[in-house]
Image (cartoon, rainbow, N blue to C red):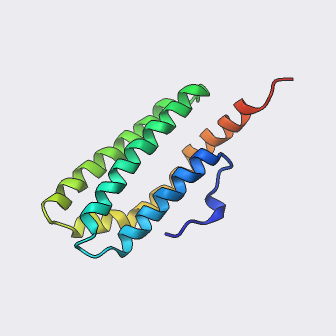
Amino acid sequence: MPWNERQALGVAEMDATHREFVDLVDALGQATDAEFPALFEHLREHSRLHFENEGKLMKACRFPAIGEHNSEHLRVLGELAAVGRSVAAGRLGMAREYVRNLPAWFDTHLATMDSALAARLRQSAQPSN
């Protein structure tokens, strides 16, 4: 899942965070069993901070779909916590499958929820006439 510039939304802060997410998922896809647990924990922490920051951005621009967007973030954080427990117990098969499915989720989330947020942020940054 290498970063593709077509994934850029035109909001530098979001694009940098998304690039880091993509890099982590890509690294996890290639990680050895020994490397996987620490990288997965890094992904969990990155995602927590990523979603927390997007929540602040949503509040700042009064994003109309904040409830739905935050709910999606909470769902993913719950999945990461559950998968993280399997990783901690040494069960990597399910975790590797979860990581293989993250690019599809990310592409959908990016094209729907995050692109709408980015549009709102760009709009709110425009000076009023």
- Give the residue drawn at x 65%, y 63%: 5
Whole-percent x and y of residue 2? Answer: 52, 70
Q: Is residue 82 shown to the viewer in this render?
A: yes
Relative to residue 116, is residue 29 drawn left or right? left
Q: Position of residue 77 (x, y in %)?
A: 33, 45
Image quadrant in which you'd find residue 50: top left
| Image vertical order of residue 67 relative to residue 104, above or below | above
The quadrant of the image that shows the C terminus is top right
* Residue drawn at x 37%, y 43% as measured from the top left: 48
Residue 65 visible in this rendered orientation of the protein? no
Q: Quadrant of residue 13?
A: top right
101 lies left or right of 65? left
- Residue 37 image position (x, y, % from top left): 24, 63
Residue 116 horizontal/vertical position (percent): 62, 41
Q: Residue at 58% across / 26% down in the picture?
A: 60
Count of numbered marks: 0
Q: Is residue 40 above or below residue 72?
A: below
Does 11 sit left or right of 113 as displayed? Answer: right
The residue lying at 41 percent from left, 36 percent from top is 71
Which residue, as the protein is rendered here, is positioned at the far right? Answer: 129
Q: Nearer the viewer, residue 75 or 57?
A: 57
Q: Residue furthest left?
A: 89
